Image (cartoon, rainbow, N blue to C red):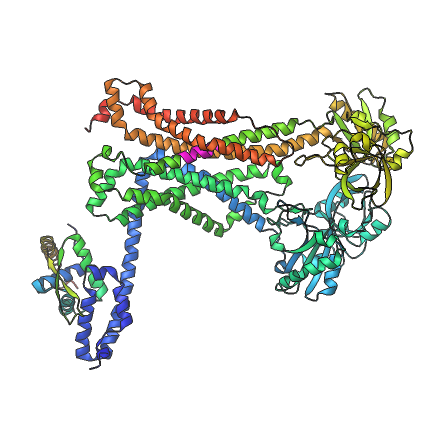
Amino acid sequence: MNLIKYRPPALAVWIIRRLSVYNEKHSINGDIIEIFNEIRDEKGYKSAVLWYWMQTFLTAFIYLKSTFVRSIAMFKNYLKITFRTLKKNKGFSVINIFGLALSMSVWILLVIFIKDQKNSDTFHTNKDRISRIITTSTDFGWYQDGYASSPDVLAPYLKENYTFIENVVTLRKMGGTIIKNNVSMSVSGLFAEPSFFDIFSYDLLQGDPENALNAPYSIIISEEAALKFFGSDDPINKILTIEKVGDFSVTGVIKNTEQKSHFIFETLVSFSTLSSLENSGVYRKITDIERSKSHYYTYVLFENKNDMSSLEKQLLNIANTLFPQPLNEQYGFELQPLKDINLGLNLSNRMPGTMAKVEISAIPMLAALLMGLACFNYIILSIARSLKRTKEIGLRKVVGSRRNQVIKLFFSETFVVTFLALIASCLFILWLVPIINSSKAVINNGMQINLEMMKDPRIYLYFLLIAIGVSFVAGLYPALYLSSIKPVTALHGVSKIQGLGHLFTRKILMAMQFGVSLFSIIGIVYFYDLHTYWMNLDRGIALEDTVSVFLRDVNPNIFKNEVVSNSNILGISLSGAVPVYGVSNMTKLKKMEIDEAKYAYRITIDQDYMDCFKLHIIAGRNYSEKISSDIENSIILNEKAVKYFNLGSPEESVGKTMIMGEDSEVVIIGVVKDYIFRRYFERAIESLVILYRPQEFRYVNINYPGGRRTEVENFLTESWKRLDSVHPVQLNFLEDFKADFDNDNQAMLITSVWSCGFIILVALFGLLGMAAYSTELRIKEIGIRKAIGASVMNIAYLLSKNYVKLILYSAAVALPCAYFATEIMFQFMAFRPELSLWVLPAALFFILALALVTIGSQTIKAAIANPIETLRDE
Amino acid sequence: MGKLTVNEEICLIAIWHLKEDAYGVNIRQKIKNLTGSSLILGTLYNMLEQMMRKGYLISRKGEQTFQRGGHNKVYYSLTQEGEEALKNARELHTKLWNSVPENAF
């Protein structure tokens, strides 16, 4: 007897087995076999099998349908219950929603921002095949990854030697003022080769992208510029003059675009112009590759995106070929695909619209922190509310709810709360973003957040995922915890649950919240200290009440004569750049006997500069206009330079000869006391070489009496008009630079204060919940005590005792951590304040005060309650 | 007590007929005899489950047989509520149909 022919089909049997309810309570397994056998006996094996399969499919279908229907019904039921629960505990619900909304807002802001940034350069059709070549240098430490720029010889070299490269383009930054008929407009832009339009997808409103950048002295302008200079006339082939540079023929108008790109440019000038600019001396000729690498940008279009890795392998060889010894050991090349440019590596010489990943890396940490805290709160508050619900839970279980169902109920609660919080955050964001976008700091850095993407439905999927994730994290513990409450204990009464295990967990969570709040406050205060320190730092140079006027073509002496008679002019000096805030040039310097030259900063001043800015010569002498050798052959060093170049003591170094630049011999005639001569002072003071080169004087620095800024401004503007009627006067008030700097710092400070505020708020929410919880817990105890005769104060003390202890414990950990963490961070700065210790107890006091107020609100409520009410149940 | 659906009525009556012998296969067979239509197993069990939840039926485990591949039978019997429900259903039907003249449709 072939047994197989007597059995029902195995696969179908397996399916039937999976229909759990029918198996457990009803006897589908048995019944279906019985009928199968009957049919097999009556009609044969094949009919039986057919019937069996039919039943399997149909039953499975029905089963799934009814399960689905039941789940929906259950779900609706849960929702109903959830809303009822939330309404009953409006206070707690609002707190939870608020806390979660706050932290979700930060997440959402982050998601939007990153998506927006990542969106940059996505409009180019060739985007997958475009890469930039960046230059790496062993000079950079852990903080920066290299230069965004690369030498100009690179692009032609690549195009010539690698067939898989379809096209290359070299760019160089360009800036200047366009002048026509007394209308001027300052523009930023790029020198670009004709291949620019072949690689990148920009549209020209007018002009032909094939030819617009071919001829030298061609310029493509923005719509705004076209309107400004030509009105409604056709700008093509008309002439525009860029000051100090030359006359250009307009070959195109670039279409305005909202598309985000890591380039920000208003004009494009033909790259071929550069060679004649260099030949005619308008631009300084760049001969060595080491300088060239800082000025040009190389972009490559590959035939096939797979070829990118082939080039990557070759980059080492290419660097060795292009950089001569010993530079090739210091510099190298790396490939940076277009999509990785924004929010990528931290590079020097960036294109203005680019942001590096590290710069925004603080935000995810903040978001994660806030989220963690908010989840803590939710967990704590849920458990707190559980007191009121233990009876309900007990009842449910007695009536027949399985633990799974109770768990699902609590999860659905969490989900509803989270979802409401999500909606609240979205609204909050819609309100907040326009405010952020209008702040100056954001506009300057191209960091505006584009809310366009809120219209894209996919982003709501992200949000939903966030909501689900949060509700899972926040809801897991409460769900498991609350559902495990045993009916017997529950129905017995609240007081029996007092010592609920997990007390330790709650305490830890609370302590952590306080710890984080303390840490934040201390951090903020120290930060503020740093900020004020920097604001008031004595640079060693008198920059107050000074304005630096750009001379343009005006002869310095003529200018001096024009203004010297005014009573508001206290001092006049000349320099090659705006003092301190304009210093960036460097030069090579070495001792005669030594081969290796080192770099130092370089400024040009006149003989009055030192007096005007109150700098001190500590050895040798200042420049004098009477001594002709001072102009070509003399240098003054600062103290640091003397040490850096091993010249002995300042006195000893005077009179020594050094080689500057390529081969100029110079004599040290004096040493100036160290002062902070650059805008930034994160690093310690570096070496400075001070020269006296009248041909380099570009700026007149005028000291005026305090409070007379407006008069001076008016006077100088008037005087300027007499000397140069075409160009507007360019007055650089040094106090404005300082204000800018302070503003930048301030922006960061304000952000930090807000974040700290968020954190403390979330922690206080948590405390509020906990206080309410423990108050409820002990409501009977309070009643009894009141009845016995305790005062409100006594009760308040009793209830707060534990929390105060908790805060003190967490302070024991948080305070030292905050102090040492800040200390370590400050170690890296050259100029930093001492960390005052009184901040620590002050922060503690502050948090304690807030905490006591919060707890107080609950204890007062409890203490006032009528003992008769609370003890009624007993 | 809620009204019985037609299917539930059929099912309960079938079970009533079978008395002590009402288990899955038999019930299905009986319904086929009474009404002429053959139920899918899934539908049958859904109904039985529903009615058990409503309290009209209780179940008890029966014996194993070789015929069933070693699985137990599950017998169902009417509860008092079940019989009440049937009584009400009959009343309702009688009242309803008595109100409609014979040659109405």
Is B33 or A468 nearer to us in this picture? Answer: A468
* Left or right of residue A261: residue A19: left
- The number of discs equals 0
Q: Which residues are magenta?
A: A511-519
Quadrant where the C terminus of chain A is found in the figure: top left
Is A500 or B105 nearer to us in this picture? Answer: A500
> Which quadrant of the figure has residue A390?
top left
* Left or right of residue B78: residue A228: right
Q: Position of residue B17 (x, y in %)?
A: 8, 64
- Say if residue A105 shows up in the picture: yes
* Left or right of residue A868: residue A531: right
At 17% across and 68% down in the image, what residue appears? B70
Q: Position of residue A204 (x, y in %)?
A: 70, 54
- Residue A515 magenta-highlighted: yes
Looking at the image, residue A178 lies above or below residue A270? above
Farthest bottom residue in view: A1
Q: Position of residue A184 (x, y in %)?
A: 77, 40
Looking at the image, residue A749 lies above or below residue A596? above
Dominant secondary-structure state across the stretch colored magenta: helix
Q: Position of residue A54 (x, y in %)?
A: 26, 71
At 30% across and 25% down in the image, what residue appears? A862
Quadrant where the N terminus of chain A is found in the figure: bottom left
* Left or right of residue A263: residue A593: right
At 52% across and 26% down in the image, what residue appears? A839
- Say if residue A210 shows up in the picture: no
- Residue A384 magenta-highlighted: no
